[in-house]
Amino acid sequence: MTLFTFHGDLPSLLSRRYRPGPRVELLLGRRASVKDAVEALGPPHTEIGRLVANGREIGFEHLVLDREEIEVEPLRPPVDVRTPTTLRPAFPDIRFIADVNVGKLARLLRMLGFDTAYRNDLSDEECAATAERDKRICLSMDFRLLKRSRIVHGRLVRESDPLAQLREVVELYHLAGQMRPFSRCLRCNNLLEPVAKTTILSRLEPLTRKYYDAFERCPRCDRIYWAGSHREQMDKIITALAPEQP
Ligand SMILES: [Zn+2]
């Protein structure tokens, strides 16, 4: 038998038959990696921050032994994906891909300026492939998607309200100091570019034309942004997330 102990909120991710945890004894009939063994009990590998077997830190590929005691610890904030760990290689930058079940979260992350790939018709296969190719952190509420080995960094989003989800992600990855609000197109994730008011005058409503002088444009979809659009709502959200931000 192998004894697994799940720490933090990981017991809540155990499959029903192994709940409430936090300790689960398992007889493994064949040689299994610790990644496969833990995922068979419930939690996706993305949720694990550290693994210790009989007091020694191990990687996902470690083959589980009989009479071994394995401690399974959760990811603990702040998680910096740009620093390698025993479990995962580093990613060059903080970039996300959002699964179809967290679309509103994707839009909020874009509002804060974070590169967030999202399409509402993305299959699990495409989502995992994009996460691997672009080295993106995968955000999802789907256990099965996050168990795919092509996904290296990810988060099983715990909250259901989009604003609470945003707070969850901002806190986990310590994003408060890295926001660049209003720098990205909400529709297609592209960085916005300044555009001269004179060149878009005919596209503006009379009041917008009268009260605003600074405009930005998405080079991909041509949508125009200015201080009045979305900004008041977002200012409140940003202030709530990071009181030290202006
Ligand atoms: Zn756009």
Image (cartoon, helix red, strand yellow):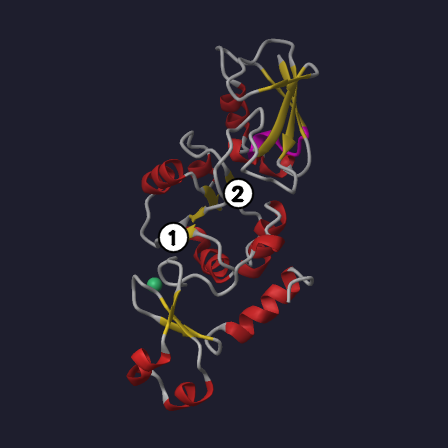
Circle number at residue 156: 2
Nearest-to-viewer mark from 2 and 1: 1
Secondary structure of the residue carrying tag 1 is loop
Specify the quarter for ligand 1: bottom left
Q: Which residues are magenta?
A: 15-22
Q: Which residue is the site of mark 1? A: 118
**Residue at (58, 32) in percent of width and height:** 48
Tell me, yes or no, whether the highlighted magenta stretch contains residue 18: yes
245 above or below 13? below
Tell me, yes or no, whether the highlighted magenta stretch contains residue 128: no
Instruction: Give the image location of residue 17, x and y in percent.
Output: 57, 30
Quadrant of the rendering where the N terminus is positioned: top right
- Closer to the camera in the image, 80 or 37: 80
- Closer to the camera in the image, 93 or 125: 93
Would you say 244 lies left or right of 149 here? Answer: right
Q: Is mark 1 within 8 Å of ligand 1?
A: no
Q: Amino acid at mark 2?
A: Leu
Instruction: Give the image location of residue 98, x and y in percent.
Output: 43, 49
Quadrant of the rendering where the C terminus is positioned: bottom right
Instruction: Give the image location of residue 29, x and y in percent.
Output: 50, 11
Q: Is mark 2 within 8 Å of ligand 1?
A: no
